Amino acid sequence: MPEIILSINAGSSSVKISVYKTPEDTSSLVPVQLAEATVEGLTAPPAKLKYERGDEKIKGKELENVKSQEDGFRYILDHLTNDKGLPELNKKEDIHFTCHRVVHGGDYPRSQVIDKETYFHIEELSDLAPLHNAPALTIVRAVADILPHARNIAYFDSAFHTTLPDYICTYPIDQEIAQKNKLRKYGFHGISYSFIANAVSTYLRKPADQLNIIALHLGSGASACCVKGGKSFDTSMGLTPLAGLPGATRSGSIDPSLMFHYTHSAGKPSHRSSEKMHITQAEEILNKNSGWKSLTGTTDFGKISSSDRHEDRLAFNIFVDRILNYVGPYFTKLDGEVDALVFAGGIGEKGDKLRQAVVQGVRCLGFAIDEKKNGTAIEDVVTDISSGNAKYKTLVVQTDEQLEMARGVLADKDRFVGKK
Ligand SMILES: Nc1ncnc2c1ncn2[C@@H]1O[C@H](COP(=O)(O)OP(=O)(O)O)[C@@H](O)[C@H]1O
Ligand SMILES: CC(=O)OP(=O)(O)O
Ligand SMILES: [Mg+2]
């Protein structure tokens, strides 16, 4: 009997849920997708529903009462169980596995069944991913409440980066304090980078362990990753997802002293602090009230890209500049042995103007794109947008964190069975 897998990706501005059934052929590691639902725009209300099941499509349905990732999850679950065209999922009891994208997994090198111990450990890490871990846990709790028979598995964004060399993940600070408080570069978007590395290796017919790419996951949160021999060698996010590139509401890297000049109450608890999550005003400002929202008033990078307003141009140019701060250095870290520059994430997949500007900025390295290919809507999992005279490839990958997690369920089922 096929089993149903619900794969849940709580991002900072969206909740994406894909429904799969296990394949008839039990030796296959390819889950069969039945439906995909997204609630997006949580940082630019009203949130909107996108739904796809076969030919059935809903796009842009406004959801007045959906304000958080948990609301999004509950809405989607009702939508799925009420969809008559999805007989495999008529009732909540039909769901066997729920996969949860958890951004900060600390030292966990791979996925974990969420038992009490893992739950509390993830909760402890909430302070280090204030836009992510706590919302993901609200969904874990909702699943425990509504789907008590389902097996909950956490997939960590940080796990892909456990291969970072020590001199890359170590901050040059007092090492006793660093070790005691686990202060190091963790890196995030790893489920996406794992999907990207697999997809590009298949597309280029190159074994995954020989693949060198510079990957850019550009969504509400944005990061860069230098993949060397199929493994994460460097990445732009750090101890928390705040470091590196700016995002929808995040500043990205700034001079660490800036906050002490911004406000005298930087170290005081933010009003959002709770018993479960401690967050200072500094963290609140830099995570929630900065980035595109603070510069332009919107978190929609599509709007920013197509506008001529000064503040939108400024935001666009800042993003291009900060991305270029990583592409050149990663190119040298790979010693010029680069299989491709890869764009992914909502902005990477849809932002043709941004791709054009970034590639223009690294043209001296031998990257060039074909304007027509770049301007055409991306439909395949991997699309080559390089021009004929490019020395290095530029690819766009439609990343799929939900599929990466569901594949993990099939690959690791034996490890999960019996544990709950
Ligand atoms: N046409 C577009 N051009 C550029 N960016 C876009 C376009 N459409 C949507 N986006 C951006 O994609 C972002 C969402 O990316 P996504 O990876 O789905 O987000 P999340 O980080 O929540 O998973 C939105 O913030 C929006 O700014
Ligand atoms: C890690 C992170 O920033 O994730 P997202 O882009 O989904 O917010
Ligand atoms: Mg995302």
Image (spheres, rainbow, N blue to C red):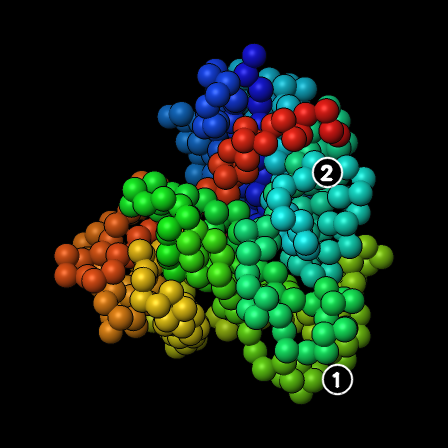
Q: Determine which of the numbered discs, if any, sits on residue 59 in the image.
A: none
Name the amino acid type tagged 1.
His
Mark 1 CB near ligand 2 (8 Å cut): no
Residue 259, position as x, y percentages in the image: 66, 81
Q: Residue at x 64, y 78 (%)?
A: 172
Quick one: 234 or 65, which is closer to the camera? 234
Crowding near the residue tagged with mark 2, few <14, some 14–19, many ≥20 C-alpha atoms within 10 Å: many
Between circles 2 and 1, the one closer to the viewer is: 2
**If you read the primary sequence from the N terminus, does the residue marked by circle 2 or circle 1 appear first?**
2
Query: Splitting the image into 4 quarters, where does residue 76 fall?
Result: top right
Q: Residue at x 73, y 56 (%)?
A: 125
Q: Secondary structure at mark 1?
A: loop
The residue at which mark 2 appears reads as 114
Q: Quadrant of the C terminus?
A: top right
Whether pointer 2 and pointer 1 mark residues with C-beta atoms closer than 8 Å, the reply is: no
- Does 29 sit left or right of 368 as displayed? right
Q: Which residue is mark 1?
A: 264
**C-alpha separation, residue under disc 2 versus residue under disc 1:** 40 Å
From this viewpoint, is residue 8 visible? yes
How far from the left and from the top, in percent, is residue 121?
Answer: 77, 49
Which residue, as the protein is rendered here, is positioned at the far right?
275
The three-letter code of the residue at mark 2 reads Ile
Using a 10 Å C-alpha cutoff, classify the residue at mark 1 as few (fewer than 14 neighbours), some (14 to 19) or many (20 or more).
few
Decide: is 266 above or below 333.
Answer: below
